[in-house]
Amino acid sequence: MNPRVVVSGIDSSTQSCKALTVDAETGEILARASAAHPDGTAVDVRHWWQALQDCSPDGFSASAAVSVSAQQHGLVALGADGKPVYDALLWNDTRSAPQAAHLREQFGAEWWAEQIGVVPVPSFTITKLAWLAQHEPATADRTATILLPHDWLTWKLAGMPESPTTDRSDASGTGYFSVPENRYRTDLVQEVFGKVPKLPKVLAANETAGRTATGALLAAGCGDNAGAALGLGLQPGEVAVSIGTSGTVFTSTPQPVADPSGAVAGFADATGQNLPLLATINAARILSGTAQLLGVDLPEFDRLAGAGPLDAGGLTLVPYFDGERTPNLPDAHGTLLGMSRANLTPENLARTAVLGLLCMLADALDSLRSQGIAANRVLLIGGGSKAASVRNAAADILATEILVPEPEEYVALGAARQAAWALSGDPEPPQWERRISTSSEPTHPEWATEVRGRFARAKELLYGI
């Protein structure tokens, strides 16, 4: 009997680091670990490294291969000595909104969509480069290398070699990598930053980035949403809807997408194909924030959201609490409409938070469909999908079949699958079984149509969109 070969997948997200140890052949999860990251939109990257080490004090010594998937877009600026010169600006840091607007105006949205694949919003790395150059010029002058979060962690695991690496999925979220041309646009980096620091080499999906100190093979790694798509094994016609710190709606397609509106980002996936995606800044925290307002824990919030009228008694929450990326409203705030003494109950407040979240995701799903992308089935994942009130309303608000896979760290699982792929040398990633927990079909009730209509009217009233 052949000995079991194990691999490790890492998900370095906004809130924490998660690591899975997985059987390379079957995908069976053998061990798991996690460690928290500090809160905030600008972070000392040393916290990420400490959290990763906390997840594996022995440096993944039992694993034959390791892969890192991480939050996208974050700007890690290093000096000539390889040390950070500034806290990493994360995807949810909106300070670069003016720079994003300027870049859209300077080149035009159609140019960005066709030439790069994305239209700048404050999340993207290129806008953070522009902000750093304008507001911290001395720091910009000291910047010798630009990395993304997964690039930096992979580089650290590899022993900080002279040439850092990235992959196409993560590079596609920078705003200075052309997905259609599959190359960096260093002219854009020069334009916004005044120089071109060292950029990581872009590896193919199944290439390797070196070895860890314990001898494990290092896979290329990927952006977090590409990792989730790989972990889920998305099939044609399937769309993943993830409710985590951010909300994301994405699928894998053979052809790239160019959306001049900027709603659908034409990212790359972790298999050599494309990953059209929409992302929201507000997602699971809509639920936790409302629970905090009500003075209850999440299980009680979930019970309240399922106990009242299906349409929240006429309440409508537009939950742009932290500004928003989709739609592009970085200065927006949350708004509650339709209040009366009769409907202002804990049950209705909890329910309208759930409905506001799902209406945002339904709008994103409609935008994906408007690009000619089939969305016959939704795979609902992320921490927010654990709420019964969310699962029970999702099929009717999203108007499609809903599959809820068994709860799992799908980003880390996708990274592990990539590690197994790199280790095998095969042309395709290994096929692992996908386990579904629940499924539901839409019944197209009148209340869901009314809720979406109220949400659309509220957005029009508040923001003219």
Image (cartoon, helix red, strand yellow):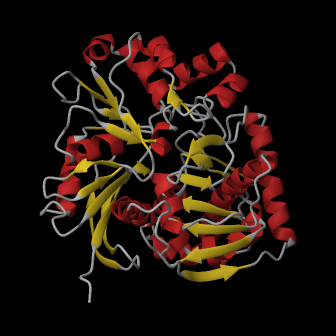
- Residue sitting at 73 percent across and 35 percent down? 463
User: In the picture, residue 104 is in which quadrant?
Assistant: top right
Is 60 placed above or below 299 here? Answer: above
Q: Is residue 287 visible?
A: no
**Residue 422: horizontal and vertical position, in percent?**
37, 58
The quadrant of the image that shows the C terminus is top right
Give the camera-side residue of 316 and 145.
145
- Residue sitting at 27 percent across and 11 percent down? 138
**Residue 186: horizontal and vertical position, in percent?**
47, 19
Q: Is residue 79 visible?
A: yes
Direction from residue 360 to residue 324 in the image, left or right: left
Give the camera-side residue of 146 and 208.
208
Give the camera-side residue of 365 and 201.
201
- Residue sitting at 22 percent across and 62 percent down? 55
The quadrant of the image that shows the N terminus is bottom left
- Residue sitting at 25 percent across and 57 percent down? 217
Is 197 placed above or below 419 here? Answer: above
**Residue 305: horizontal and vertical position, in percent?**
61, 72
Work out which residue is located at the far right of the displayed protein and give it: 446
**Residue 151: horizontal and vertical position, in percent?**
33, 41
